[in-house]
Amino acid sequence: MADNKLYEALGVSRGASDSEIRREGGDSGFGFGPEDLFGNFFGGGGGPFGGLFGGFGGGGMRGQRRGPRKGENTIHRLKVTLEDLYNGKISKLQLSRNTVCTACGGKGGPAGALQPCRTCNGRGIKITVTQLGPGMVQQMQSRCPDCYGEGEVINERDRCQSCLGRKVTQQTKILEVHVDKGMRDEQRITFHGEGDQMPGVEPGDVIIVLQEKPHETFQRNGSDLLMKYTVSLTEALCGFSMVVKHLDGRNLCIKHPPGSVLEPGCVRGVLGEGMPMYKNPYEKGDLYIRFEIAFPENYFTTEGKLKELEKLLGGRPAPVPIPAEAEEVNMTEFEGQGPGGPRGHAYDEDDDHPHMGQHVQCAHQ
């Protein structure tokens, strides 16, 4: 019985075929907009089913949008350098957008020239209802092929000569994008109402998304700056001075005192030399420097000099006792192909046969 009432509401008989359902309710519709069929069952909107379950809380289960419909936003990516984000910058961006035609006032032609499309009844969307089973229907939506989704048609001779009946014309506009100090990668700058215009539609926004380019010296981490610097073993032990060119063009002279030993991979900080804070540019983060040590080449000096260096470095630890039956072997360089490399994997070729694949052997003396 409930199924019969549903089919009566759709305007078709229970025994109607899918093609009959589409013919009866597809093009002419049900007198309401392109909202989902079941959304109208449970919403408080218009249409023959609007208000069927309305009244809960005074407005149905789904809220209604008030005011004019808003157009889509336009998103542009703007590439900026780390210097731009540090110092601030004004970039000019040229945009091409649609504006309401001033010649016809956004009507596309003279008064009365535009007529509702008969195919979609002015909705711009064709609705096709298909029977899925007893008491179940499926609604499909597609853009009307006759009016191209506009909902209106106009004769060729009546079209506005300025916009050719499209109601809008192309306009080029220059936007000034203020990149403030301390802004971040992927931060958005919004120009409200600067998007494409359409008659009866509130223009969308133009959203500028900042895209930070990689920097050859610095890497940003929030409000801090990170960099790497390589010093020689002599500098790591005996002190040094280094000059760092900052993002605002200043040269920072950084000194490391003699006797303060730097270890490979250690990090030192310079307070207050990081990125400026967004909207508070006089406060800045810190600069962190990771030091790498460049060791001298093999056999860089004579054995006598090495003895002197050994004494300066405090000598050696006590030698480990060597058992009499110990076998002496030599180490060789593997040039980065240690454990996990191509030669290291040779030991993992067959776990069930540990003697298979052991092709690398140490040389015996």
Image (tube, rainbow, N blue to C red):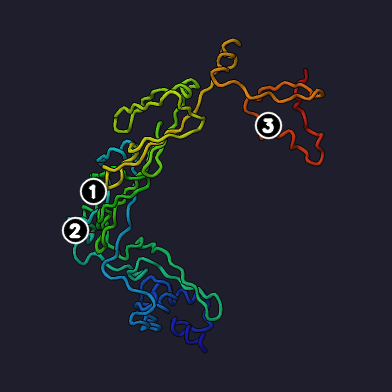
Relative side of 63 to 331, left or right: left
Compared to 57, does 350 lie above or below?
A: above
Closer to viewer: mark 2 or mark 3: 3
Q: Label 2 belongs to which residue?
A: 104
For image coordinates 39% across by 81% down, the residue present is: 49
Q: Position of residue 138 (x, y in %)?
A: 49, 73
- Disc 1 marks a residue whose amino acid type is Gln
Q: Position of residue 71 (x, y in %)?
A: 30, 59
CB under 8 Å between callouts 2 and 3?
A: no
- Disc 2 marks a residue whose amino acid type is Cys
Q: Nearer the viewer, residue 159 or 348?
A: 348
Relative side of 176 to 223, left or right: left
Element type at marker 3?
loop
Real-space Cα separation, disc 2 to disc 1, in angstroms: 16 Å
Compared to 322, does 93 lie above or below?
A: below
Compared to 276, does 44 lie above or below?
A: below
For image coordinates 35% across by 82% down, the residue present is: 57
Q: Nearer the viewer, residue 221 or 289?
A: 289
Q: Residues within 10 Å of mark 2 (few under 14, many from 20)?
A: some
For image coordinates 36% across by 75% down, the residue present is: 32
Element type at marker 2?
loop
Q: Label 1 belongs to which residue?
A: 171
Q: Label 3 belongs to which residue?
A: 342
Q: Mark 2 or mark 1: which comes first in sequence?
A: 2
Q: Mark 3 or mark 1: which comes first in sequence?
A: 1
Real-space Cα separation, disc 2 to disc 3, in angstroms: 74 Å
Q: Quadrant of residue 224?
A: top left
